[in-house]
Image (cartoon, rainbow, N blue to C red):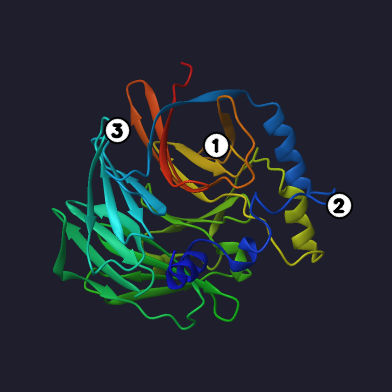
Amino acid sequence: MPSTVYRVLIAWGTLALLVSGCLPSGCGTGSFDEITPADSLSRALAQDTPADSLYRVRQIESTEAHPIGYPRTLHHRPDGSLIVSDAERNSLHHIAADGTYDREVASDRFDVPFLTGVVGDTIWVFNAESDVLVGVVDDEVLDDAGFAIERADEASLAYTAAHPDAFYLKLLGEDIGSTIYQYDWDGTMQTAYTLPQEYWRYAGFLRVHNDEVWSLSGLRPVVDRLPLDLSTAPATPDTLALHGFDSPMLERSYAFLRGDTHQPPLLIPSVDLIDDRLFVLNVRSGWIQVDVFGDDGALQRRLIEANPQPNRDFFPQDLSVHPHEEGYDITIAVSNPDPMVVTYRWTPEP
């Protein structure tokens, strides 16, 4: 992987300090043996919550026919087809609704592409190297859509989300704090909303759901919710705690909160929101676990890959959920140890 791409992947997706020792491949709980009271309650709730098996229905690995370099973000279309951004090959992969590989779309205007969202027929892609948003229709990058953004700090983390009426950008860094910007689609910045807590607290994806902007915290089990019109947002976001979230990393998370370590662990790489459910990708060393929460933040089910196999090099990047008559297809982008796109199925009990 080119060094520039690697730098951008770190800056975009996770804090560099996470990569240095607190991903599943390099971070155990060590001698830390305490967690917060809230985490203790959540752990007890998780232990009392039923677990269902996630059954693998298909996987697409990198081959000569359909090479996949670094699958980073996913987006399901309503018909069940899937778009995958490839941050190494600077391309988009299209996968048909039946799970077969369709095509790859590459462009010299893709620069470490991350999916922002789909509005109508337009796929919006944010390029993390050039900081340029572009629109794609019928596999063509549009000349008259999109715009560039400016970062006050080149090392800042950036996350984006799309709504028919607005583009949202979250920028955060140690020297600049955390801000969510609301743009019109012509590139005019309408509102800058400053988030009140430490910058690391807001490292995570942006989503638009139920006429709200949802800001994920990948380092703590909480989600912040804001109105679509950020100019009307309160000084403090509405924070939804994920009651029932459990992780072997909670001890180290508490140690970081106390100042006993400088390396906060990544707990939640990604979240998808479907109907009244939150599907939370819960980091595990070698297998997939997805926790399902209600929109009140209460844990409903723990979904665990059937026959999990430990692998400390394993790391999932993103998930996208597609509902259908039989339940939900949950697709995961896996970067390590081998790039692949894996789909699991969950059929909830009546």
Q: Which of marks 3 and 1 is nearer the N terminus?
A: 3
Q: Position of residue 286 (x, y in %)?
A: 60, 39
- Name the quarter where the N terminus is drawn: bottom left
Residue sitting nearer the eye, 304 or 325 = 304
Distance of label 2 from label 3 (alpha carbons): 44 Å
Helix, strand or loop for disc 1: loop
Image point (60%, 47%), residue name: 313
Rate crowding at label 2 as few (under 14), some (14 to 19) or many (20 or more) other CA atoms within 10 Å: few
The answer to whether 337 appears left or right of 331 in the picture is right
- In the rendered image, the vertical position of residue 58 relative to residue 240, given as above or below: above
Residue that extends furthest to the bottom in the rendered view of this protein: 152
Write down the residue under mark 1: 288
Callout 1 environment at 10 Å: few (<14), some (14 to 19), or many (20+)? Answer: many
Residue 69 numbered tag: none
Q: Quadrant of residue 148?
A: bottom left
- Judging by the rendered image, the residue that carries numbered circle 2 is 31
Q: Residue at left 48%, top 40%? A: 278
Q: Residue furthest top?
A: 350
Q: Which mark is residue 99?
A: 3
Q: Which amino acid does label 2 sit on?
A: Ser
**Amino acid beneath label 1:** Ile
**157 left or right of 101?**
right
> Quick one: label 2 or label 3, which is nearer the N terminus?
2
Q: Which amino acid does label 3 sit on?
A: Gly
Residue 297, located in which quarter of the rendered image?
Answer: top right
